[in-house]
Amino acid sequence: MDGGGSERSAGVGVHPGVVPLSYLLGTWRGQGEGGFPTISTFQYGEELHFSHPGNKPVIAYSQKTWKLNSGEPMHAEAGYWRPKPDGTLEVVISQSTGLLELQKGTYNAQDKVVKLYSELVANASKVREISRVFKLVNGELSYVVEMATSLTSLQPHLKASLKKL
Amino acid sequence: MDGGGSERSAGVGVHPGVVPLSYLLGTWRGQGEGGFPTISTFQYGEELHFSHPGNKPVIAYSQKTWKLNSGEPMHAEAGYWRPKPDGTLEVVISQSTGLLELQKGTYNAQDKVVKLYSELVANASKVREISRVFKLVNGELSYVVEMATSLTSLQPHLKASLKKL
């Protein structure tokens, strides 16, 4: 037994519950831009990775970002996307900042749109709510993250566009 | 800029806050045994991975387990270990089951013992508390996970011993 728990790529051994989201499986890389009323706008490089154990309706998700000019690591997060039989989607994420998210939402397999909204944000000093919308447009995966804090209502924080490697 | 956010191994570019835990950095593999009053005892293969972005006092943690006879994937979890300047340790974990953990605890750099206890367990139907103790003994990393549920007080659930690859 070398390794075990091997991860499958899209189309091979995908659990039926994951098929509608199988277009995500793989590694995506690109650039994003962040901002918020309380901070300056910034750019970042990003890599997203979605993988799948094949035998369970779960997608493992990991993300990291870096400064474009130096490559210095910035943010990272990891978690699991859990499509449900009723067509809803549950996502759990832990962030390198210590923040924890439980997100609930929906996916549209035909339009390749995923909409998530935080049911729980824990261990954050200021963040109260987070929404995430992912869209596949012309083969590029784009997302918008909105955030609400103790000072500011829900509004855009991050947006990026990524190409599959 | 290829990749960015490169991860460092122990001893190279380790953030001062991570030095006391740098013995963890790398990949560990071995076997474990699980049990609980409400389930049958079971064995599993396991791989743990600890990595470090170098510029921040954070260790990225990921784990996966598999059935020993077939290699079929079982559990997976991922998160971040965040050593604090006051000598305490905060750990956030998301699990493939959807469970989220915020753990707080301590580490003893000389004895290479880490003790963690859940401050928050979220999105679990039965689990109420989780404690995790990691020890390095004769170069092997062993751990014990204890769990309390709505039916059962805190008691051993998982134990494993892992060698660094």
Image (cartoon, coloured by chain):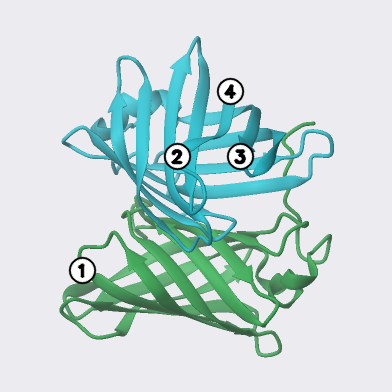
Chain colours: A cyan, B green
Q: Nearer the viewer, mark 1 or mark 4?
A: 4
Please name which of the two marks, 4 or 2, marks the residue nearer to the observer. 2
Q: Which mark is residue B65?
A: none
Type of amino acid at the residue the image marks with label 3: Pro
- The answer to whether residue A103 is seen in the rendering is yes
Q: Which of marks 1 and 2 is in front?
A: 2
Q: Name the residue under label 3.
A: A37
* Left or right, residue B57 beside residue A18: right
The answer to whether residue A15 is visible is no
Reading the image, the residue beneath label 4 is A161
What residue is disc 2 on? A154
Q: Quadrant of residue A36 in the image? A: top right
Distance from label 2 to label 3 (Cα)? 11 Å
Q: Residue at x 34, y 50 (%)?
A: B72
For disc 1, the marked residue is B126
Q: Residues within 10 Å of mark 1 (few under 14, many from 20)?
A: few
Disc 1 from disc 3: Cα separation = 40 Å
Name above or below for residue B125 compared with residue B40: above
Tags 4 and 2 in contact by the CB under 8 Å rule?
no
Please identify the quadrant where the C terminus of chain B is shown.
Answer: bottom right
- Please check whether the numbered discs 1 and 3 fall on a single chain: no
Secondary structure, mark 4, is strand
What's the residue type where badge 4 is placed?
Ser
